[in-house]
Image (cartoon, coloured by chain):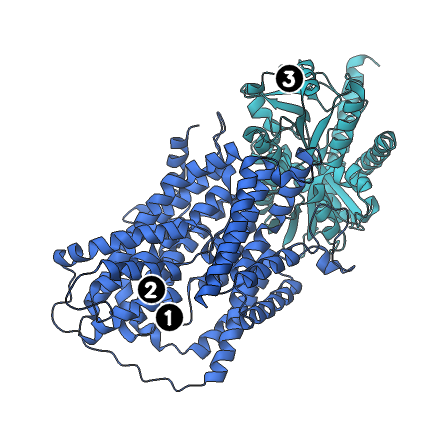
Amino acid sequence: MGVLDHVWLGVLAVFTAEPAFSIFGLPISITLVMVFSGFVGGIVVGATPGLGGPFAMAVSLPILISVFGFTPDALLPVLGFLVGIMKGSTIGGAVPAILFNTPGTPDSVLTTFDGYPMTRNGQSGKALRVAHFSSVTGDTFSDIVLITSAPFLAIMVERFLDFPEKAALIILSLAFISAVVGRSVWKGILGALLGLFFAYIGTGEDGYPRLSMGSEELGNGFPLVSAVVGVLILGEVFKSMEDMWREMRERSEITMIEEKGDNKLRLADIRRILPFVGLSAVIGTAIGALPGIGSVLAATLGYASGKKMYKGDKSFGEGVPEGVAATEAANSSVAGANLIPVLSLGIPGNVSAVFIILAAESIGGFNPGPTVFRVIPDQINPEMVIVFGLFTTMICANILNWTLGGIFMRATGVMVKVPKQRLLAVVLLLTPTAIYVQNTDMFAIYFTLFFGFIGYLMRKLDISVLPFVIAFILANRLEEAMRQAFSATGGNPWFLFDSPISIAFIAIAVIVVVFFARNKKALG
Amino acid sequence: MTLKTAKKVLVSAALGVAAVGLMAGSAAAEWKPKGPISLMIGFAAGGGTDTQARLIASELQKRKGWKVIPSNVAGRGGALMARKLKSLPNDGTAIGMAVTESFGYNMLASKNPGYTADDFTYITTTTGSQMGLVVKASKGWKTWDDFLKAARAGTVKFGGMSQKHADVNYLLEQKYGVKFNTVILRGGRAVMNALNAGDIDIGYGAGIQAKAVKSGDMINLVSGVGKRIPYSPNAPTLIELGIPYDIGAKFIVVGPKGMSADARNTLAAAFAEVISDKNSEVNKFVTARYTGPDLISGKALDDFIKNGLKESKTLMSVTN
């Protein structure tokens, strides 16, 4: 079976899955329904200040898994839903940024710079349309890069990397993520080491449960879902609650500013913004492909380069559509490219990718990494079918985004009125419930609360949580790769320096850490 | 009594026994799990145990209406799962699937496995492995001797799935005066991936290699079970090579110790029903890849486990 057969099987898997209902005799598969619901849910969540894609993923994932079960058939509907949320929340984030000067997601802070002035000039409709067009274009571009490059990268990894190189690559990824995320490189590394520490409790190949101090509960290690959801979601909820309690500021009255004049997106507008969209899409995709750097930096860089390129009467920040376009194209084009390291190396680079891995690990039958693209002669590689199914759901979500996204987006302006203090309470209640639904074990909830507390402390101490979570996910693979490399080289303790490729990986890791440690200090 | 009548008597006796068995079965069928059954898989997703367990789970759900929730508790050749399982309720709502080695050699080889063979109720085996020492055809080694020549000329990387394989490798090294770099990988899928990627030169395959061998992409150089593998008739067995061990494992379903006979028998019967049904997916799977349905349960299974323990102790005393 060649690659093209797998592509076709993947497409079929999406469209011919168990039909949920039919329209005019045309059966609509459950996967498509899930992509659509995820997409709409994503827009709503993105448009709600204080909520974001990760919250929606964390709460919905355990529930979806318990509904769809643990068979490989469950993979595409669940992954499709996550893809929908990922894409929906990116465009949703721009809505309150433009209409109310309140970013819905952190990466749309820069959208307020030009989006809100446009609204004040009565151009809110046009600003939203520009944001939608730029966002979708950037996203589609990013997906095309993902679909065309991930398989080749994966095949290269499988062909050229041996055990020692694989261990070195994981070390390099962790070093890179620790160095680029957050304000301090050393705190990033501390976060990653903490993640490794917790992941190594009760796991490993030894004949006894290590570091468990004889406790039966710790002896099995911490469940992945508890660590991820606790640190990423509950930690954030605890921190936000404290912030709210300290600020207790009066909520300013939210008023809707009327549109006036021509608010349609004309061909002339598209021609004006297209160069900015193009530049930002390239920047966002390049940044997305590197693990650890998120859409906030992409938006910042996109906006800054757009500003340099722009020559007009009004300058950036006074309500020019190019400003909105440059930001939105950049932050949206991160999403697709972010899956490149996940699918080709098995290394998650950002929060959405972490949830994709979590879904795959929980359901089983799909291990994101280079082996999914392996062609087995005369046989179907079910994992490759899933990957192409995943790509198909991304394309479906893009089509939805092009056709219906704009309409949904403009309808979600009301979400800004949802009070944050109630939202947080709902999330705090839903998260442990969702975890219990999946694990039916009180210890999973205790562990989640424990990790929530750790996430809270890390935020208080300004230690980034992303290196922690990614290190937790990669910890066991790192240990395995190290053990295997050690025995494959005949017990050579210097196995990391055994081949030019692994020496290069380790050298780059050191250079990255030193470089960012110096430059971040220089930036203050 | 002529031979024919003897046969008739035997057949009717067998039928009678079967009928009694059936009645016992129907009485036992009144046992029902109190809630969803958690089926813990001792190996990683995508491997042979995982595939079987998931196929069986969905089939049991369909036929019996039981809610069966599979989850992977991979690590240490099934030991991680066993340790978790032993302290769970023994009412049939918690069962695990691993290989017989997890309750034999692997357990004995571990410093402190956290469980003993007496901690479990052995429900049933499902199928047996056709363990082979497998290489990629593109390596150019057609026989064990070709491989030995290459091993003498340089180092070879040898992928196994458990400490037992490392021990057998040690015996092979002693016998043939060669040196292997033995790497322990997590399950059959990982061995296949490493072989394909060229990370190892030869590996242990418990049947996962069947399709690749039949298509000529891979070659079984040696059979690890007591007899030659049907589709690789030229590969000698380990015993023929002078290593007197049958390292073929069986896949096994277990529960915590002290499970009621009702629960044990009903579960065994339910598994047997699904696996021996020629139309079921799992039947097709174990037939294509392994030795087909191989169902040992009850007292016979207890004896099988005891015997395996004895043999493993011998192997360990030889290598240490």
* Chain containing the residue with disc 3: B
Crowd tier of the residue under label 3, counting other residues whose Cα lies within 10 Å: few below 14, some 14–19, many 20 or above: some
Give yes or no for contact between labels 1 and 2 (Cβ–Cβ under 8 Å).
yes
Of the chain colours in the picture, the one used for chain A is blue
Q: Nearer the viewer, mark 1 or mark 3?
A: 1
* Discs 1 and 3 carry the same chain letter: no
In this orientation, which residue lies closer to the viewer: B117 or A455?
A455
In this orientation, which residue lies closer to the viewer: A383 or A260?
A260
The three-letter amino acid code for the residue at tag 2 is: Gly
* Chain containing the residue with disc 1: A
Which image quarter: residue A463? bottom right
Please tell me whether residue B267 is drawn above or below residue A425 in the rendered image.
above
Residue, x 72% and y 16% (percent of image)? B236
Tell me where residue B136 appears, x and y as whole percent: 58, 22
In this orientation, which residue lies closer to the viewer: A288 or B109?
A288
The three-letter amino acid code for the residue at tag 1 is: Thr
Q: Nearer the viewer, mark 3 or mark 2?
A: 2
Q: Which mark is residue A48?
A: 1
Residue holding disc 3: B232
Residue A126 falls left or right of residue A521: left
Q: Residue B187 carries which label?
A: none
Tell me where residue B263 appears, x and y as whole percent: 73, 49
Please tell me whether residue A305 is drawn above or below residue A31 in the rendered image.
below
Q: How far apart are marks 1 and 3 (CA)?
A: 63 Å
Numbered disc 3: secondary structure: loop
Q: Can residue A405 be seen in this view?
A: no
Crowd tier of the residue under label 1, counting other residues whose Cα lies within 10 Å: few below 14, some 14–19, many 20 or above: many
Which image quarter: residue B143? top right
Tell me where residue A239 appears, x and y as whole percent: 52, 74
The three-letter amino acid code for the residue at tag 3 is: Ser
Residue holding disc 2: A92
The chain painted cyan is B
